[in-house]
Amino acid sequence: MGALIVAAGMSAAGFCPMGAAAQAQPAANPARPLPIFELDPDWPKIPENFRAPFVSGIVIDSQDNAWLTTRRLRSMPDGDKIDGPAIMIFDPEGNYIRGWGGPGEGYEWPESEHNSYIDYQGFVWVSGDSCAGRPPAADDDQILKFTQDGEFVMQIGHSNAGQGDFDTENFRRPPNVQVNPKTNELLVADGYGNHRIVALDADTGNFKRMWGAFGNPPSFMGEDPCFPSEAESFEGVGAMNFSIPHVLLLSQDDLLYVADRNNRRIQIFTAEGKFVRQIVRYDAPFARNLAFSPDRDQTYLYTGYGDGIAVFERKSMEFIGMIQTPGTITGPGHQITMDSKGNLYVTGGTMGRLPERPTAGRLIFKGMSNPQ
């Protein structure tokens, strides 16, 4: 194991829980206990014949197995080593179990794998973020549904078919999905090319409704860049449109948290799409990803911020502290999640050179610190 990593208390000046107007939030409370983590340097254990993967996404199943969504390297040879499957599954000890994924009969596999998600019935959903304006020249405008053995079930939308924010049949490079077990609705963060949340029937894929920032109809009708820029200014309540709603997460009390990445804010909605509140961090990249603590009340909310991961008390959105990301990950990570024991998993995802180790790490939960 590595060194202990404590979520250190720090000033929260600049964190603004916001409704109609910004309000300053008090500094972190030093009397609050903080989660303590320890880096697991041996996780995950990649088979010797596989090259170290670029890990974009991660999800934990009901057995605490970690499902890594990896991006195929294709044009980057590495001696005799080969790419592992697009979906790589590891047991709680970090041992490789099996994998699957990639192009197949009857569906359009993403050109650039982004993330996967396991719903309450055990189905696996896969989405991608390839943009036609950069290699490979294709837009991943579809979402795929599989069994856990990799058997194809359904495709919603088609590659290169998205028509923008009012298209009810296709997406535009959707980063993430969730399924609401109470309504069996597939909730889609349709965010790299579009600016909306979409709700569909998870069995049929039929469109039900959509909404944009603050619960309003999506209204952005401009160009669709492959590399959307951050907002030009961060003032007041912020932009009226989403800019890369990158992750969405449904809480046990039926609140939907949306990481509006390039607007540096988390917006909170009811499961039906009614806006509740938001929290914004202006001084650094914020709301890169989302995870809940695994206790019954989901007491803590984790999100990528600056060079690490910020910890909030979920219901009050009180800032608790910061967590340093694993050594194999730079900055706030790309995707994060937690297992049933409270261990924190972080992925990197950025491609550009062959990694020496998988772009993913695990922080072992060691308990809570003593309040000061």
Image: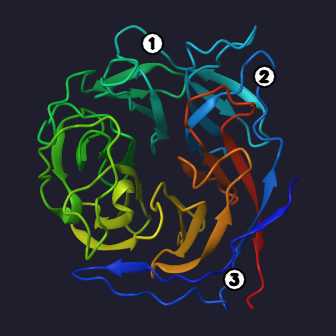
The tag earlier along the polypeptide, 1 or 3, is 3
**Dot 3 lies on which element?**
loop
Check disc 2 and report the residue beneath it: 47
Q: Residue at x 48, y 65 (%)?
A: 284
Q: CA separation, marks 2 and 3? A: 39 Å
Given the image, on which type of amino acid does mark 2 rest? Answer: Pro
Given the image, on which type of amino acid does mark 3 rest? Answer: Pro
44 relative to 351 in the view: left or right: right
Can you tell which quarter of the image residue 310 is in?
bottom right
Can you tell which quarter of the image residue 74 is in?
top right
Check disc 3 and report the residue beneath it: 33
Check disc 1 and report the residue beneath it: 103
Q: CA separation, marks 1 and 3? A: 47 Å
Say if mark 2 contacts mark 3, CB within 8 Å: no
From the top left corner, tell me how far across and down residue 146 is, in percent.
44, 26
39 relative to 14 in the view: left or right: right
